[in-house]
Amino acid sequence: MAALQEAPGAQGADQEGSAQEGSQGEVSSFDEDQIEAARKIFAGPIAFLKSAPKLEHLPNPAVPEVAFAGRSNVGKSSLINGLTSRNTLARTSNTPGRTQELNFFDVGEPLKFRLVDMPGYGFAKAPKDMQRQWRYLINDYLRGRDVLKRTLVLIDSRHGIKEVDNEILDMLDAAAVSYRIVLTKTDKIKATELAEVRARTEAEARKRPAAHPDILATSSEKGMGLAELRAAVLEAVG
Ligand SMILES: Nc1nc2c(ncn2[C@@H]2O[C@H](COP(=O)(O)OP(=O)(O)O)[C@@H](O)[C@H]2O)c(=O)[nH]1
Ligand SMILES: [Mg+2]
């Protein structure tokens, strides 16, 4: 745990984000105390723990975990960086399919919970046997991890839920793994489009047995929805 530090630059990134956060007029399902408690934890010590390319490399299941799943390029790594106000904690990339491992991040000192950056699915250009390998890794982890408290399934707000997303949602429903849908990159669409995709996605979530009935809309770029998502993570591990 000596490796845990407050990331340099956390302060600056926080200031950037704070102008947007909470200024979107969104109805929050969390009260001020929950938002503040979550803000504090995410502003504190967070450190990369390890990458697990295979299940046998998973860290000891010591604390609760929250996983970030979604298509390649949907914004998983950016969202982890946004939540933690650290620009370079999780590696982001313009090259989809780069992240092939489960990446674990320790939150809190003493350790409180872990964030897990999952390999992206639906990267059509990846070789077939590699795709199959990722699928096994993702499925086995999501279905078999006792300390996994919630999976956040990220959906690009420009596209909504696609066939390839339905596959993982079906799997989570079948295995009764608790998950919540999070729209990403909302800065890229108009407010009217967001309202439309939000309603459509929420209707879909309410039909799905293992899904949280409410969805969250976020932009890592603008900071929208991040305060809420921090509270949702804390609620899941609490
Ligand atoms: N405009 C915008 N771009 C984003 C946002 N989140 C991620 N991106 C971009 O989308 C690309 C993929 O992001 P990344 O976090 O690496 O996706 P991952 O493959 O799911 O981990 C990168 O070029 C990011 O800069 C966002 O909220 N807004
Ligand atoms: Mg990534």
Image (cartoon, grey):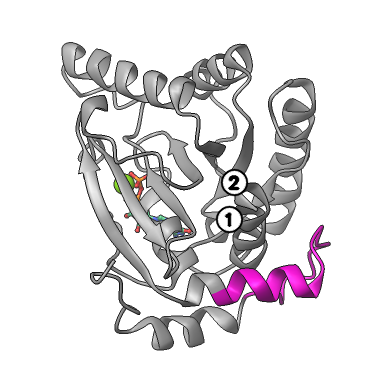
Pointer 2: what residue?
Answer: 183
Magenta highlight range = 21-40
Task: Indicate the amino acid at tag 1.
Answer: Thr
Question: Is residue 176 at all visible to an observer of this figure?
Answer: yes
Please tell me which residue is depicted at 79% across the width and 64% down the height of the picture: 26
User: Which quarter of the figure has residue 211?
Assistant: top right
* Mark 2 lies within 8 Å of ligand 1 (Cβ measured): no
Q: Are marks 1 and 2 in contact (CB under 8 Å)?
A: yes
The x, y position of residue 79, in whole percent, is 45, 57
- In front here: 237 or 227? 237
Q: Label 1 CB, ligand 1: below 8 Å?
A: yes
Whether 29 is drawn above or below 162: the answer is below
What residue do we see at 22% from left, 27% from top?
56
| Callout 1: SS | helix
Crowding at dot 1, Cα within 10 Å, few <14 / some 14-19 / many 20+, comes out as many
Q: Which residue is drawn at the image coordinates 76% and 49% (left, top)? A: 195
**Kind of residue indicated by mark 2:** Leu
Q: Is residue 93 visible?
A: no
